[in-house]
Amino acid sequence: EQKEEEEAGETKMEQKEEEEKKDAAAEGGAAEENGTADGEGSAPVEAPAQAAAEPLGPVRTPLEPKVKEMERKLSSDVARLASSFDFEGSTWNHLVGSQRSVMKVRETSVYTGGNEETFDFKLVLAEMDAISESARKAPGIGDLSGAAVKYSFLNMKDDGAASADPAEHEEDFGDPTEAICPGFSDKREQGTLTHVFLNFLVKEQCSEEANERVESSSEELAQAVERLLLLTRPFSFS
């Protein structure tokens, strides 16, 4: 009998504790409702954080691929000179737009200088005929059809020593704002001509041996190099 009385007492104490917990929870809920209604005692509600900041305006990429017609023409012309000339990318190439390309070219010294760099690079500007200087100054006169690209030697000697003299820009464009990009001048090297084939441009300033190597080079080599250039697209991404 004493054991039963002890169990009954424990049961009553547990029930009393549960009732006290329910009363405390009810009082807390009522206080929260009163605080919210009065505008006091409520925790500030934070706005949900955005997953990512939305960009302002269009997203711009630093790379602007060249037009396909120009890439094909450049790949073909460079491939046919690969046996006698070295080509290298220029930092100006990404700044002149999708219809122009700037690269460095020199006669290779592999055959003449014991693989020493005995010749200096020159900057070459390639541009579609539709936006060339002649098209700007004489529109509709002598326009070339198809994938017409013009090649010129630039007066600039290297990538880092660009002429940024406003007087030169005024001489080239008449208005400094018409410059292709800041610090770049498309002024041609004095005494040179503009050509629609790259080999005609470089043959004026290279050795007879270099021209002979180009003429005797195999068509298989030119096709292989051209295929490689079309796959890797260095004129757009280098």
Image (spheres, helix red, strand yellow):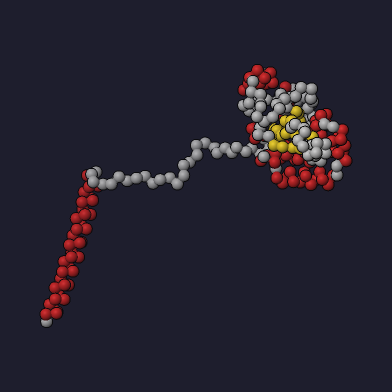
Q: Where is 106 relative to 34, above or below?
A: above
Quarter location, residue 135: top right
Along the horizontal axis of the image, is 38 left or right of 65?
left
Count of labels shown? 0
Along the horizontal axis of the image, is 24 left or right of 150?
left
Quarter location, residue 40: top left
Residues 10 and 107: in front is 107
Q: Where is 22 relative to 126, above or below?
A: below
Quarter of the image for the N terminus: give it: bottom left
Can residue 77 be seen by looking at this rendering?
Answer: no
Quarter of the image for the C terminus: give it: top right
Identified at 23% across, 51% down, the residue is: 32
> Residue 12 at what x, y percent from top left?
15, 71
> Residue 104 at what x, y percent from top left?
72, 34
> Residue 94 at what x, y percent from top left?
65, 35
Q: Where is 230 relative to 94, above or below?
A: below
Identified at 23% across, 46% down, the residue is: 41
Can residue 235 be seen by looking at this rendering?
Answer: yes
Residues 38 and 224: in front is 224
Q: Residue furthest bottom?
A: 1
> Residue 146 at what x, y percent from top left?
77, 35
Residues 203 and 12: in front is 203
